Amino acid sequence: MTPCVPRLFIALVASVASFGIAASNPEQARLLVSIVVDGLDNDYLQLLRDRFGEGGFRRLEREGAVILNVDYGPGIDAAAATATLMSGASPSTSGIGGAARYDRDAFREVSVYAAPDGEFTSTAFTPATLRVSTVADEARIAAGGVNVVYAVAPSPEQAIALAGHAANTALWLDVKSGNWTTSSYYKEMPVAIATRNRTNPLTTRLDTMSWTPSLAPADYPAVPEHLAHYPFRYVFPRSRADRLDMFEASPLVNREVTLVASDILRTLKVGQHEGVTDVLNLGYSLKPFTFGKNPDTRVELMDAYVKLDRNLEQLFADIDSRVGAGNSVIMLAATPPSNRSRRDDEQWGIPFGEFSTRRAASLLNMYLIALYGNGEYVTGCHRGQFYLNHKLLQEKSLNERTVRTMAAAFLIRMHGVDRVYTLDQVVEGTAGEQAEALRRNTVVSDAGDLLLTVAPGYELVDDYHAAAPAGRIQMVERSGATTAPVFILAPGVDAQTIGTVTDARAIAPTVCRILRIRSPNGASAAPVHLKKK
């Protein structure tokens, strides 16, 4: 066990004396359910409202507090956004800048939660990278460790952020085996989930599963005629090597998350412990489905919303029957939809281009050779970030800041480049219009020397370390907002709508205030003021 666990449990004991609140408070919520939906867009919620049931999204709108515009800031993905929601800390403080980071020593991309020692495997994950506590950790500490904390999500990056450091376990879908798995860091694998893996494995059920529309295609709003007459159908045959990846990208994975959550509620008596708050945190996904042949997947996306609404209705009904509607706090938060989409068909004439990181790095290296002499100046590229060879710069007695400035001036002149910032500009808060927000969202220890974004309509091809795979799905950049809605359904909180822009870092303190526990140790924003009943 890593040193992190003993420290947390020492804190558990100390907190019982310092707080003295959980075990004797009869009004303490029995269950906290934090739900994070990757890519949920409020515009689609409103568009599909009449297609939803009464017990899912409409219940959240009808009975809960709705914060319409939660701002995450620029350059953030679902993994970083989830960590921000759970910790109340920006990436620069939490250490979670994205789902993956670039390992300068190994010259490869690894999960942000990859364990630093030993060979990387599907279970070699640790929350140690998350430098701060989370709402789940604080609930565990407040209860002196006599409560339980579980998290379930499709990916390890989402599940671990939802679980925190002190959870009983974090569960995610292993896309290699099709089983629900956890890390060796967490010591518990619930018997019900192990039994599910053994007796009802996904790989066996996939043979007969298919994804078809929940409604007739013409019943989805704003559907053009050419899509209304041909309902889609996706299957997951054994002949497809990527069938588990395909399944994980489909809305059917959300049903699996809901079934696992139901197993945990049923078999582990979550929410049944008097005087303390148990935690069951869940991750769902509405990310774009890129496995179809037609680039126009709006019907598939709308169907994913309808299916998720039904999953939520089932989940909420299960919580009400087992825990009681007045005994639980439910927070559902969206992470911003991806600003990348399938390339439009060429017949529409929308300007399109590709920006190859391999080619850009090669040209940049030749430019720096011309300036400073022979050497390998660029050692890596990762999602638009360029990493310079610091050891070589030191050997040549070159000023790193000067080299970064010269490199940025060269890259910005390349075709398809929209913006280039040096790490110095980011740290000093001088990197463009959203400089302070970009600084907060950058983990300096993991960041490249140069941060580059391509122009709208361009595809960023990460082919520096390996040639881009043949037949890759072209995803192009689009300009887009980084705000998303959050719903809070809790006893004593009145139904209300907050339309003003709200800092994402305020959500964790808001939930903690409702639970009457302290905020995570990295949270700096004030809680949102919610009207009480």
Image: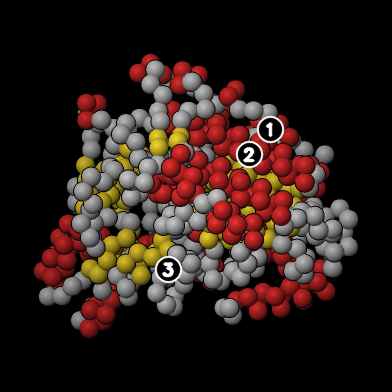
Q: Position of residue 222 (x, y in %)?
A: 45, 20
Q: Is residue 247 visible?
A: yes
Q: Residues within 10 Å of mark 1 (few under 14, many from 20)?
A: some
- Residue at 49%, 20% (x, y): give it: 216
Q: Residue at x 88, y 62 (%)?
A: 24
Secondary structure found at label 2 = helix
Q: Hey, what amino acid is under mark 3? A: Thr
Q: Nearer the viewer, residue 532 or 370?
A: 532
Q: Give the mark, 1 or 2, whose residue is nearer the N terminus.
A: 1
CB within 8 Å, label 3 to label 1: no
Q: Which of 201 and 385 lies nearest the eye of the viewer?
A: 201
Q: Does the residue at mark 1 contact the one at mark 2 (Cβ under 8 Å)?
A: yes
Label 1 sits on residue: 55
- The CA distance from mark 1 to mark 2 is 8 Å
Residue 282, horizontal then vertical, whole percent: 60, 50
| Quarter of the rendering occupied by the C terminus | top right
Q: What residue is disc 3 on?
A: 121
Q: CA distance from mark 3 to mark 1?
A: 40 Å
Q: Is residue 224 visible?
A: no
Whether residue 167 is situated above or below residue 338 in the rendered picture:
below
Sequence order check: which comes first, mark 3 or mark 1? 1
